[in-house]
Amino acid sequence: MQLLLVILACTGPGPDTAPVDTAASDSGGGDGGDGGDGGEAEADCDADGSARLSGSVDVADAWAQIRGAEDGGRAGQDVDVADLDGDGVDEVLVGARKVDAQRGAAYVISVVAGEQSVEASLLTLVGPDPKAELGSSLGGGDLDGDGVAELVSGASGTEGGGGGAVLFVSMDAPDEVGEVVGSAQSALGEVLAVLDLDGDGRHALYVGDRATLGGAAVVEMTGAGSTADAAVVWGSGTSVISAVSSAGDTNGDGFEELLVASDDFGGLGRVWVADASGGDLSDAIAIESDGNVGGVGTTIAALGDTDGDGHAELGVGSTSDCFVMAGPVTASVSVLDALGRIKGGAAAHGGSGLAGGDLDVDGRADVVCGAFNGDGDHQGEAYVFYGGVEGVVEAGDADAVIGGGGSVELVGYPLVVSADASGDGCPDVVLGAYGWSDYAGAAYVVRGGLE
């Protein structure tokens, strides 16, 4: 397999754009609540830790439950958050890559308390052709600099021959769908991230590509079109990109760095910390396996400052564990030199999800580590550690364990921390569970700390 990462600064609609459905957020599901409308805050955030999550938390009791509408559709196989309507509250983005005979869909959900269907979405973007698998990846950000964030979703199966595509659309112009396509067998859109690395207020799109230019690369585009017409910025490697993310500002230069992961690089995986200046990934800072830990780079995340030293930590997942790498990361390092290690176990797939954020608003970032087989029966679990971790800890010793509701749900793959998805002004944990109800899939919003 070949490895490519492309950076796309996208403007305008592309060819063969996909249809979009829009609907009011109260058109189905849910029992009201304060989420999604940016309205009055329900409670003050938990500044003293008095209302942290603790013990076992069943997703059946989550503040919000977003349900897939089609058996086998796999809603929640990817989830993300972004404020697409500008009201100060994150919408939850839910991908369902297998709906409609694998055409796929991406949903923008204004979350309400209780249960709601993906069919109650503010906006639904559907795959441009059969077997497109739209919803393979998700993101949101202002790609064209107009001050309005776009929904971005990968369709890794579209454009015959496995070329793939990335589609983007804004809430205020739902009929104007932009498209970037890949070359044959590139599976463009399997992984993506929407980031503003240079801090100019305009986001760019970073996309993994398996076939173009003979290896790992970052490609920049100025509009909709084909990655074949792009200029290479980064290049290296021969393996498939497994994840792309912001690293946060790890070196204190005022700008975010880029995390690029390949979980099969050299048979054990590798993560690179790269800046926006370009170059060869082989010259970038590397986070590597020690030779025993496999699947390094299964997941990656900017965690925030967990230890209170003023530097952001990096999160790296493997096939068994979640690692917290102390910032600043200024030289190549092994995962065994991590500040903290959450041991989930290979059977549990203990590094299948990973996110960070200050859930209890105490000034220090917290860590959530997912394991889609954490209970041994594919219900899945996510482990919440307030204040992060130092040293080696067992996943089961977490401050709270968020678990599946007694059936195959695959909770914990994926997951993300939202600044506020419930509308109460406080952070939340958003978890995908694409195995729910014969793989119709689901997503859950668990509030992280209220008093």
Image: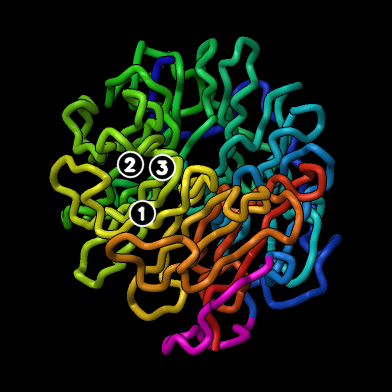
Disc nearer the start of the sequence (3/2)? 2
Q: Which residue is mark 3?
A: 318
Is 443 situated left or right of 417 in this image?
A: right
Q: Which residue is mark 2?
A: 259
Q: Which residues are magenta?
A: 40-58
Disc marking residue 302? 1
Helix, strand or loop at label 3? It is: loop
Helix, strand or loop at label 1? It is: strand
Question: Is 277 rendered above or below residue 22?
Answer: above
Q: Which residue is at a point 46% across and 61% down the rendered structure image? A: 395
Question: Is 157 rendered above or below residue 24?
Answer: above
Q: Is residue 108 visible?
A: no
**Rounded to the nearest whole Å, what is the CA distance between mark 3 and mark 1?**
15 Å
Magenta residues: mostly which secondary structure?
loop
Badge 1 amino acid: Ala
Disc marking residue 401? none
Q: Is there a contact, CB below 8 Å, between mark 1 and mark 2? A: yes
Q: Crowding at label 1, few (<14), some or many (≥20) Cα neighbours within 10 Å?
A: many
- Can residue 49 be found in the magenta stretch? yes
